[in-house]
Amino acid sequence: MLRERGIVERISAQKAVLRIERTSACAACESRNSCHLQNSREFFVEVDNELHVEPGDVVEVSMPSSSVIRASLAVYFLPVLGLILGALAGGASAAALRLEATTASLAGGAIGLVLSIIVLKRLDRSVRARPDYFPRMTKVLKKPVPPHQHDDSK
């Protein structure tokens, strides 16, 4: 289970928007150079407000490690596989298409890449319906301390 700390920024209806700062785990991540978060110290996540938190609360956010690994494999592996298989298929069909092998491989690779992206978009739609691919608040770590009221009548 992957766990991070987040601060509740705002709530709306049944949702809470959390601000999560990058942690030291990002420094050890193999994908840190290709991550869209590399130039930002924080990012925002919308989660279900199952714990009835309020703005300023510090919460723990969790997501199953297996879900993250499966999603990462799909996002990184499918386009590469589509590109390679498309290039191989294009090269193999070059003679039948009366094209130069290099041209057919390039065209096949491009088609394979486009098809893999279409498959990823469809997978994304089906994954969005599965709760194990969404982060969840698992516990409230700290409530904000209310400001002290000063009695100026003395």
Image: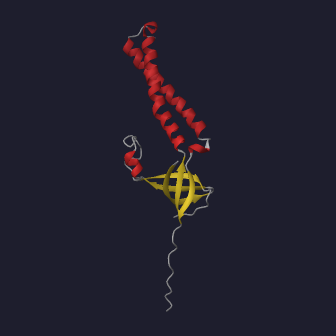
Query: Based on the displayed image, in which of its 4 quarters is residue 121 positioned?
Result: top right
Q: Position of residue 96 (x, y in %)?
A: 46, 7
Q: Return the residue found at the far front.
A: 1
The structure residue drawn at horizontal position 51% and vertical position 90%, both measured from the top left corner, is 153
Q: Describe the colour scheme in one phrase.
A: secondary structure
Q: Is residue 92 above or below residue 69?
A: above
Q: Position of residue 151 (x, y in %)?
A: 51, 86
Query: Based on the displayed image, in which of its 4 quarters is residue 95 positioned?
Result: top left
The structure residue drawn at horizontal position 53% and vertical position 53%, both measured from the top left corner, is 61
Q: Is residue 138 above or below residue 37?
A: below
Counting the numbered discs, the total is: 0
Q: Is residue 75 left or right of residue 126?
A: left
Q: In this orientation, which residue lies closer to the viewer: 80 or 40? A: 80
Q: Position of residue 44 (x, y in %)?
A: 49, 52
Q: Position of residue 57 (x, y in %)?
A: 53, 63
Q: Is residue 146 above or below residue 97?
A: below
The structure residue drawn at horizontal position 43% and vertical position 10%, both measured from the top left corner, is 94
Q: Return the residue found at the far bottom.
A: 154
Q: In this orientation, which residue lies closer to the viewer: 75 or 153? A: 75
The structure residue drawn at horizontal position 49% and vertical position 57%, both measured from the top left corner, is 6
